[in-house]
Image (cartoon, helix red, strand yellow):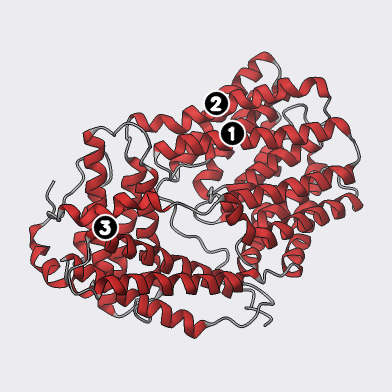
Amino acid sequence: MPGPRLPLAGVLSLGRPSDIWFKPALSVVAAVAPPNLVLLALGRLDLAAYTMAGSLCALYAHNRPYAARARVLALVVLGMTGGLALALLASALTADPVLLVTVGALLAAAQKALCDATRLGPPANVVLTFVSSAALFTPQTLGRIPGHLGLALAAGSWAWLIGMAPGLLRPHGPERRATAHALRTTAAYVAAHATGTHGTPPYGPARAAAAAAVHAAWQTLLAARTPGPRPAERRKDTHRALERLLVRAETALAAPADTDPERLRTWARALHGTGPVPHPDDLPDDELLGIAAEPATGQPSLWHRLGPLAPIAARTALGCALAGYASLALGVGRPYWALVTAASLYQANVTLTWNRAVQRVVGNLAGVLAFAALVPLAHLHQAVLVLVCLALNFGAEALISRNYWLGSVCVTPMALLITEFAHYQDAVRLITERLVDTLVGAAVGFVAAVAVTNRRSGDRLERSLTAVSEARDRAARLLAQPQPAPAVPLESARRALADALVDLRATADTASGEWRRRALPEERVVAAERSGHRTLAATVRHRGLSPGREATTRAEGVRR
């Protein structure tokens, strides 16, 4: 099949800002400012490229619980430093631009695959690739590499502290936000169900979004559990209260007609700040026993998760290499801009890659105009240059959640101004080269996405269908037992079925946006979702949280 059409309508439309847009925006400023100001005072702003590599790690893991965030941020700092080390080593060993572009493309493919396999989240591989690709084309000697890596590690350590600092004031913030988002999204589904605008039941877009939000919230709570000594009683009580709210969200998904959406919204609002977590009503102690068993189920190995990503990695390597080569052929002095442009395009399928290509081009073109307006101001003094870059850092993170192109309007002039930390350059030449590299990188990168077919998306969809069928059969067998099924096995089976259904919807959406794929089993997907959601509803009724009980508790309000 040729695949879906490539849309233009809506690609540039602005969405709502992220609930925590200010956190990465403030964090990156707090992480970048001290190292840059110290270097400015020392008259060594030319070293800012290395401290920026570490400082930009502050952009990551803001949605993760602090126990998991500590590990993820540490790995990001190490990964950033490792990519930088390889790039600096290559730069010191060779000046052949073709070879450097090849190394950059391979690094970009590895970074893309690892970030997707670990579900690192935004900004994912793009910042890592920007840092390593720029370092490839920075003149380097072997003797200076340890010092430059030391600067990056020092700034990365400071970024780690910045990322962890909010936990001192609001230690449960990520878990509370994830639960609140699940409650709000579920309330939207319940309201849409009441008006008949939720799509074809029981798997319309509104329900799929709510199920995905609830699933993500469970994953957040599970990630907050740390091995070792038992957590403090207050922390334990907070998590159990949040788990109970998620149970109520799942009840609403199963029985939307008997759920009050305003009640869910009230609970969600109560989770903002540091006040007590609301308690909807008392649940049996064994209601949450299956959750405690959840971490023992394990996750696929990293190697297993990398396998399905081979086509995406191949697209990235090919597209970045060809974009860099094309830029060299056109005589552009910074081919890594084209390479990074190509690397930034690749999403889960070709349709999403097309959307990102349009957003990247529009954002970069507008960003070049912003650079032309800002460069006279930045050239007044190096201190002004640093302050302008800090403002652009904040603006990029504040705007990018509304649409990628809007954030690019700030990212582009910031990237151009960073090249002037060592010395001021010809603004006209910078603008020209950036425009050429943007167009070349986007065009060549998208062609590579179309050329490298991802036929594994269909295989993955088949595996997802099988997983849903097996999970549904297991839950149905437990429900069919003559005696009531034990709480732990049934809850574990219910959780596995919910996870499988969320994965099936995500896999089906990804496969439907791919080009040159075989026909998808759409009727089987619909049937699997329908039967799976019916079984989920039956497990909720088995819990004792039937629609009737929910209706009788509606008047209780929020108890804290």
Of the numbered discs in the image, which one, if any, rests on residue 157?
2
- 114 on left or right of 401: right
Of the numbered discs in the image, which one, if any, rests on residue 488?
3
Where is mark 1, residue-wise?
A: 77
* Residue in the image at 69% along x and 77% along y: 516
Mark 3: which secondary structure? helix
* Residue in the image at 84% along x and 30% along y: 92
Q: Is residue 351 above or below residue 406?
A: below
CB contact under 8 Å: marks 1 and 2: yes
User: Which amino acid type corresponds to the residue marked 2 in the rendered image?
Assistant: Ser
Compare marks 2 and 3 and give the one earlier in the sequence: 2
Of all residues shown, which one is farthest toward the top? 42
Give the Cα separation between the discs numbered 1 and 3.
Answer: 39 Å
Of all residues shown, which one is farthest toward the front? 482
Mark 1: which secondary structure? helix
Mark 2: which secondary structure? helix
Of the numbered discs in the image, which one, if any, rests on residue 199?
none
User: Which amino acid type corresponds to the residue marked 3 in the rendered image?
Assistant: Val
Give the Cα separation between the discs numbered 2 and 3.
Answer: 42 Å
Q: Position of residue 74 (x, y in %)?
A: 53, 33
CB contact under 8 Å: marks 1 and 3: no
